[in-house]
Image (tube, rainbow, N blue to C red):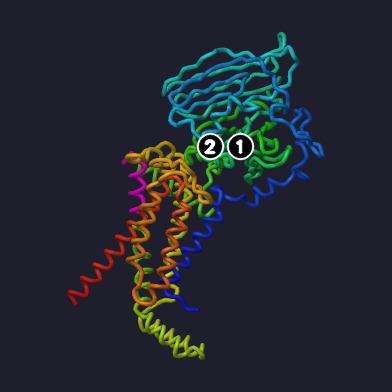
Amino acid sequence: MNLSGQQRLVIAMFLMAAIMFVYYAFFAPKPSREEKAAEEPATGETAAPAPVAEEPAPATVEPTPPPIRPAETPPPVRTGARAVVTTPLYTATFEDAGLVGLELAAYPPDDDQLLLTRLAEAPAPAYQPLIPGSENARWEVDRRKLNLGTGDRGKLTFRLVEGEATLAQAEYAFRGDDYEVAARVFAGEEEAPVTLSLGSFASGPDDPREVKDISVEALIDTKKKRDKLSGKDEVKVYPGDVPWAALRSQYFIVAAIAPQGGEITVTRTKNVSIAGTYFLRRGGDYRLYFGPKRYDRLKEFGVGLERTVDLGWSFIGIIAALMLRLMHLLNRFIANYGVTILVFSLIIKLLTYWPTAAQLKQSQRMQVIQPVLKELREKYKNDPQRLNAEMMGLYKKYKINPLGGCLPLLLQMPILYGMFMALRNAVELKGAPFVLWITDLSQPDVLFEFPFTIPLVNINSLNVLPLLMTALWLLQNKFMSPGGAVRSEQQKLMTWLPVIFLFFFYNMPSGLVLYWASNSLFSMLQMLLMKFTAGSKEATA
């Protein structure tokens, strides 16, 4: 079946919509092969504990492990030695050498920050060295408060003591202008191994959908492993070269980066909690990071920690990372991410102007010959070979490439999809205002909420940008639609596509919807400019 350029455009867009809908049905990427492997019970080499005699209990996995609560892996020493660190970026509370509370100054404690706001309720603190001790062991801290300015530096030192002996020591060095913390921990002798708690997360009955983004991640022998909350009670052990391990959500992360990392243990309690412990082959220096997942900042660690920012498949991820960096550069001069998105959308449209123009010209030529094609199909309906020859001759006469309408669109698809991934996962949009009621570009632009929820589509508020995006798209289709009998067939397809995207984008971040709406606006302006230019040439001919 021979399709016009316009029909190929519609089919390509429908395919894109279908792929995006399936891929993001629950607003999260499906696990890769690596992540699927991580979801299977550990077997063979991964099921065995690391061959270190001094390794604590968490690394030992029985063939059929019973459910283990994170706080019981192993029993921590709790004596309530507490210290509060305050910087311009955050207020962090440490207790018994572990992080039990964190408030980020630049981000509101909303649903996207569940990972951090529930640290105080978590069964296992983050970054706590899991050093066994007797009932007489106690943690001590050298100060109760540490207040730092932007350029200041300071330290906290925790000691686990039993009588006159020091069982372990944990020293944390803070900077007033960064979320990174330099750490130095050793148990007994400095070269002895240390098991470090990454923390845990316990779900609640009324948790929002963002909970499914919370997981334990680690880089194991250059491959990323990821475990989410699940319907299983299990303990999984991943030995290998582990340069980093983290507890992460969509926008935030609690991570430890250690060159001596040798194992990650993930403990899951059925649909309730998930926790991670990080085995270090020896004590000593390593680094911590808690806060927003800023791609460029995480990349500075040089160990692949930026892979916790989900930017899609490898090729798309490269494009999405480039998009993020270009947006950061623009925002240095604009200082409003909403305006930055509009300007960035215009730049992308200018860069893709000629491929888009070529696709539109092919579509317009196909519209011109539609009546002739209809006659040929009717005339040679019983002679497929002659019909094909006549159509090829017609295409040659009007300089039409049958693939010319699709190829420019396919060339633009990686850019559009990369932008989609970048905007959906950009923590820079978190809490970033645009204009009027749009005060957070990482959230839907709710004008007001309804006293009810529309079933199936989960709509309970009036969101303006998705409606504006749909209106612009429909208007764009009106300019693109051919007349006559052809219009009736294509108009049905082109009418349904914006409607599908309306429901798909309705509860998406407003920054993403703003980009899609502006892209439709600039596409429509391009078509108007092309028609005006073509009309001017005809008038002067």
Q: Badge 2 local density, few (<14 within 10 Å), some, or many (20+)?
A: some
Check if residue 99 falls in the magenta segment: no
Front in this rendered view, residue 84 or 495: 495
Q: What residue is shown with label 2?
A: 301
Q: Which SS class for mark 2? A: loop
Residue at image location 39% in from the left, 83% down from the top: 396
Q: Main secondary structure of the magenta part?
A: helix
> Contact (CB < 8 A) between labels 2 and 1?
yes
- The residue positioned 32% from the left and 39% from the top of the image is 436
Label 2 and label 1: CA atoms lie apart by 10 Å
In the displayed structure, does residue 315 sit left or right of residue 201? left
Towards the viewer: 438 or 534: 438
Furthest-right residue in view? 63
- Residue with the mark numbered 1: 244
| Magenta span of residues | 333-347
Q: Amino acid at mark 2?
A: Phe
Q: Residue at x 46, y 87 (%)?
A: 389
Query: Which amino acid, by three-letter code, is at mark 1?
Result: Trp
Circle 1 SS class: strand
539 over 286 or under it: above or below? below
Q: Is residue 452 above or below residue 478?
A: above
Crowd tier of the residue under label 1, counting other residues whose Cα lies within 10 Å: few below 14, some 14–19, many 20 or above: many
Residue 330 is situated, as x and y percent measured from the top left of the image, at: 35, 44
What label sits on residue 347 in the rendered view?
none
Residue 263 seen in the current view: no
Residue at 32% across / 66% down in the picture?
479
**Residue at the extreme top:** 164
The C terminus, quarter of image: bottom left
